Amino acid sequence: MIVLDVISGTLIILGALLAMTAAVGIVRFGDTLSRMHPATKPQVVGMVLVLTGAVINLRGNVDIWMLVLVGLFTLVTAPVVAHMVGRVAYREQRDQDGLLAINELDDEVERF
């Protein structure tokens, strides 16, 4: 049982560190398009690690399934939210000089 507690604590600490680095990245990066990466990838992976550590720590409890549902819901919705935020940020910031060197979405944006 001590081994599972050590694994659980390690996963929770690693997840918390990833979430902290994501928060630092969100604060430090300049524009919305740059902030999208730390807002989605390390944040979601950090939360999944914390949830995994909590599931290991709560072994045998009924609340495990709620944690699994939270993790699955986040994994499904985070890419969709990031995509929508990226499209809105692109539309709002595309006229700024020097933001985009090559505008690959120009034709696609004009259709919508």
Image (cartoon, rainbow, N blue to C red):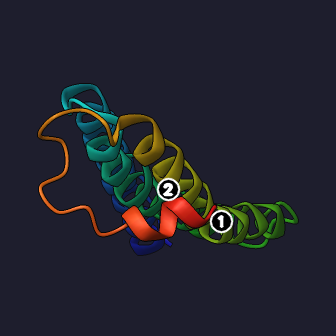
The vertical placement of 111 against 97, above or below, is below
Circle 2 — which element? Answer: helix
Q: Residues within 10 Å of mark 2 (few under 14, many from 20)?
A: many
Which of the marked residues, 2 or 1, is nearer the chain's N terminus? 2
* Quadrant of the image occupied by residue 79: bottom right
Q: Are marks 2 and 1 in contact (CB under 8 Å)?
A: no
Number of numbered discs present? 2
Comparing labels 2 and 1, the label whose residue is closer to the camera: 1
Amino acid, disc 1: Gly
Residue 105: % across, % down: 38, 66
Most foreground residue, 16 or 56: 16
Q: Taking the image as drawn, is residue 17 in sight?
A: no
Left/right placement of residue 105 relative to residue 109 reads: left
Circle 1 — which element? Answer: helix
Residue 6: % across, % down: 37, 63
The vertical placement of 4 against 33, above or below, is below
Residue drawn at point x = 64 percent, y = 61 percent:
112
Residue drawn at point x = 47 percent, y = 44 percent:
91
Residue 82: % across, % down: 51, 55
Q: Residues within 10 Å of mark 1 (few under 14, many from 20)?
A: some
Residue drawn at point x = 42 percent, y = 63 percent:
45
Amino acid, disc 2: Val
* Quadrant of the image occupied by residue 2: bottom left
Left/right placement of residue 66 relative to residue 91 reads: right
Residue hosting label 2: 50
Residue drawn at point x = 43 percent, y = 69 percent:
107
Residue 55, label in figure = none
Residue 21: % across, % down: 25, 42
Most foreground residue, 54 or 84: 84
Q: Residue furthest right?
A: 62
Residue hosting label 1: 71
Structural distance between the alpha carbons of marks 2 and 1: 10 Å
